[in-house]
Amino acid sequence: MYLIESSLLSIDDVDFEFENTTTRFIALSNLQELKLVGLTVNSLKKGKTSEAKNWIALRLVKSGHARFQDEYSMNIVSLNKIHWRETKLQKGRRISSLPEFFYPRLRRYLGELKEKATSDVSFAIEYDRVDRLARDIAHCRLKKIVSLSASPSQTENVLGSLSKEERNLYDDLHSKILKWNSKILRIRSIK
């Protein structure tokens, strides 16, 4: 993993980190050793599990030479579970933890569905459902983060449930709100 403090990570930084983490995939065909931009991917044997950086694995998947293992995949069922947990189970300011790299995976899932929707109406319907769920999850979590940011400092137990992107937002908002509060109620003498 990278040694950048999580509160300093932008959304693009988290995306970059995600692209460069290792993921497991299953080869769907035999391939000779691949050499890519200073990296070597060992030869693949059909049906065998292998590992590579996400950006390499994604290209193998898109080209039909591999498929991701289930823990990588995001689908409407897993998104519905997250939505239910966040909107129904976690009331008030309680916030549940998300799977690692939730937002980068969600953006890629939405992009994949949108791409497929151009040629298949069933994917257009699924894209609309997933888009609504994703926006609802993000909005619900955003409201909770804003509320937490306006409260006294939170414990790591509470903040540990935030994704890296959300933690960055919380830290930024909390800092701004603290400064605002200290200035808005500052007593000034009248001369």
Image (cartoon, rainbow, N blue to C red):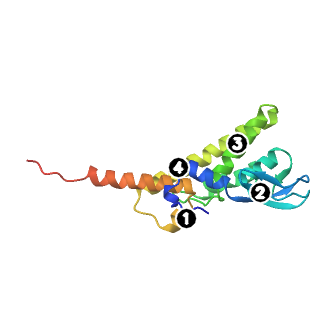
Residue type, label 2: Thr
Q: Residues within 10 Å of mark 4 (few under 14, many from 20)?
A: some
Separation of marks 2 and 4 at Cα, in angstroms: 41 Å
The residue that disc 1 covers is 160
Is 80 on the left-hand or right-hand side of 15?
A: right
Q: What is the spatial separation of the Cα atoms under label 1 and label 2, in whole angstroms? A: 36 Å
Tell me what residue is drawn at x 27 percent, y 51 percent.
Answer: 183
Name the N-terminal-most of marks 4 and 3.
3
Disc 3 target residue: 110
Give the x, y percent position of residue 169. 49, 52
Q: Amino acid at mark 3?
A: Leu
Note whether 111 is above or below 121 in the view shown.
Answer: below
Q: Residue at x 51, y 61 (%)?
A: 5
**x%, y% of residue 49?**
84, 61
Residue labelled with disc 4: 142
Report the Cα–Cα distance between label 3 and label 1.
26 Å
Front position in the image: 9 or 162:
9
What is the secondary structure assignment of the residue under circle 2?
strand
- Residue 22 vertical position relative to residue 105 in the rendered view, above or below: below
Asked if residue 49 lies left or right of residue 107, the reply is: right
Nearer to us: label 1 or label 2: 2
Residue pointed to by mark 2:
40
**Helix or strand or loop: what does disc 1 sit on?**
loop
